[in-house]
Image: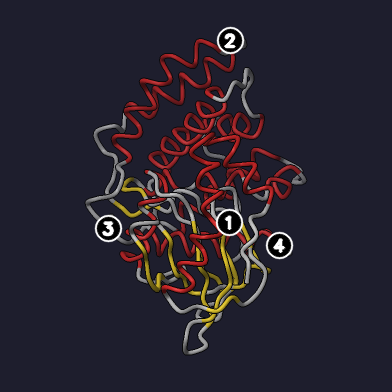
Amino acid sequence: MPIHVPPALAAHHDNHSGAEGRAWITALPRLAADLLDHWNLRPDGPARHGMVSLVLPVRRPDGTPAALKLQPTNEENDGEPVGLRAWNGDAIVRLLDHDPATGTMLLERLDATRPLSEHPDPDTAVSILADLLARLVAHPAPPTLRRLADIAAAMLDTADHLIPTLPDAGERRLLRTCATAMTELLDEPGDRLLHWDLHYDNVLAADREPWLAIDPKPLAGDPGFDLMPALDNRWHDITTAPDIPHAILRRFDHLTEALTLDRARATTWTLARVLQNCLWDIADGTKTLDPVQVTIAEALLAGPRSTTRPPA
């Protein structure tokens, strides 16, 4: 069965990785065929893809459904099998096998047609994600993973160069506030195993449990640094609320309570995520900040409000 590379996946690698990305895409059909043969797998449905990876539904020799995930080997992706082994299926997809030479993983198959982003009740969706996240960050991080301490220090160096390029003085001031807040916690970066990208599309329905996380970018650090994807995704649920800052803080409070986090520390590390997201945008040539990031930062900086926790 020939392996077809989705045009959108090829375009992303071309745009973001240049010649290296094009070479990986060119080799991808042969790589997939070799791994199918290596693990004696049978294709079992149409391929899916994200921004970086190609995922093939397969059957193992005994008929068990699985998913073959192919992605380049790089600093961002190389920690995924390390984190998955440490979690060992607790709140997250289970790693069945791994080919270190190519970075390819054989994973437990979940229901890709039923992401948590499509759950009709936003409060229930937040509760599900928060409960999964609480279980994930309960694990200590393996010593080989990237560390938040190093990432935060690098962010401050980058901020010194990029923040002055913003034309708007208010936006420059906001990012400096985020950077100053993060500086106060540089000596306490944490040692928990973070997912780093747990938003609602990265939670899928499953057979082993009702819902499981996928696609981690594992990192050793403070759980407060893991909250932002749950805040800035399903944004329509926030913007349709009567009071947008109140809706943000209501979601934030639910997350911090589910993870039993110190609210002030979680606020600071979430502001660090605002800084990180904005610095990435500026590095890509953006001259004005993402309004979503600004709105979240301003809500958190305004301080606690009286919020009502969503029902469990």
**Most distant residue in the bottom direction:** 62
Q: Is residue 46 left or right of residue 225?
A: right
Residue at horizontal 51%, vertical 85%?
A: 64
Expressed as whole percent of the image width and height from the top left, the position of residue 283 reads 52, 23
Q: Which residue is mark 1?
A: 309
Position of residue 172 relative to residue 86, above or below, is above
Q: Earlier in the sequence, mark 4 or mark 1?
A: 4
The residue carrying mark 4 is: 118
Cα separation, mark 1 vs mark 2, equals 35 Å
| Helix, strand or loop for disc 4 | helix
Task: Please state which amino acid type lies under the numbered disc 1.
Answer: Arg
Element type at marker 3?
A: loop
Q: Nearer the viewer, residue 173 or 156?
A: 156
> Which callout, 1 or 2, points to the residue nearer the camera?
2
Sooner in the amino-acid sequence: mark 1 or mark 2? 2
Labels 4 and 1 touching (C-beta < 8 A):
no
Q: Nearer the viewer, mark 2 or mark 3?
A: 3
Q: Which one is closest to the eye, mark 4 or mark 1?
A: 4
Residue 115 location, quadrant: bottom right
Indicate which disc residue 169 carries.
Answer: 2
Residue linked to disc 3: 140
Q: Amino acid at mark 4?
A: Glu
